[in-house]
Image (cartoon, rainbow, N blue to C red):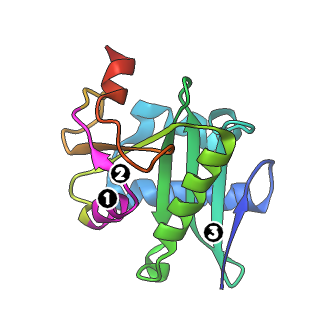
Amino acid sequence: MLTIKEASEEGESLDAYRQMLREHREATGVDFNIKGYEQELFDPLARFAKPMGVIAVAYWNNVPCATGALQDHGNGRCELKRIYVRPKFRQRGIARKVSEYLISRAAEIGYRLVFLDTLRRLTAAIRLYQSLGFVEVDSRVDSPTREVVVMERSLNTGSPKRDSIMEQRC
């Protein structure tokens, strides 16, 4: 059975988040140091602090199995980050459930737009995000590789606002 808990203070859920963040880095082979990875490991609540941020940890029969987070970017925008499911728990719809949970929380918090980035080679992730209403946007987001795909979706209508990230960065 799947349950999702929010990690809002030091403890078991935040420790599980940190461990899965390390696993995520190993699995993707991306150097997250460019994006403040070590600081995030040390103090993830600084980056994803409530009331505008969320760290979610999913448990399958009380075993930590997946994680994800929301990061505030101001102006009604947030980023869906660190969606990761441990290999032995994949193919159970857990990434979808964590993503849906975080999208729902984003709407509750009052965000109007959610965006994310993922590696182009993670085709299953891209298909999942498309099925959740995300569309690929033309963005000049800095990234450690050229393989990054940036996607977004509106929380108001479920329809994308294609130029919203570009408007914020120009």
Viewer-proximal residue, 91 or 131?
131
Q: Residue at x 54, y 69 (%)?
A: 97
Does the magenta portion include 129? yes
Indicate the amino acid at tag 3.
Ala
Which corner quadrant of the image does residue 38 belong to?
A: top right
Residue 166 picture location, percent across and down = 30, 24
> Which residue is the site of mark 2?
134
Question: Element type at marker 2?
Answer: loop
What amino acid does circle 1 point to?
Gln
Query: Which quarter of the picture shows residue 75?
Result: top right
Q: Nearer the viewer, residue 53 or 41?
A: 53
| Image quarter of the C terminus | top left
Q: CA distance from mark 1 to mark 2?
A: 5 Å
Give the residue type that dot 2 points to: Phe
Distance in Å between CA atoms under marks 3 and 2: 22 Å
In the picture, the disc for residue 58 is 3
Q: Residues within 10 Å of mark 3 (few under 14, many from 20)?
A: many
**Given this view, does label 1 or label 3 mark the residue nearer the observer?**
1
- Observer-nearest of 113 and 82: 113
| Residue drawn 34% across the image and 20% down it | 167
Give the residue at mark 1.
Answer: 130
Q: Residue at x 21, y 58 (%)?
A: 121
- Say above or below: 118 vs 170: below
Residue 43 drawn in magenta: no
Query: Mark 3, mark 2: which one is toward the viewer?
Result: 2
What are the residue bounds of the magenta stretch? Answer: 124-138
| 3 and 2 marks in contact (CB < 8 Å) | no
Q: Earlier in the sequence, mark 3 or mark 2?
A: 3
Query: Could you tell whether 75 is left or right of 139 in the image?
Result: right
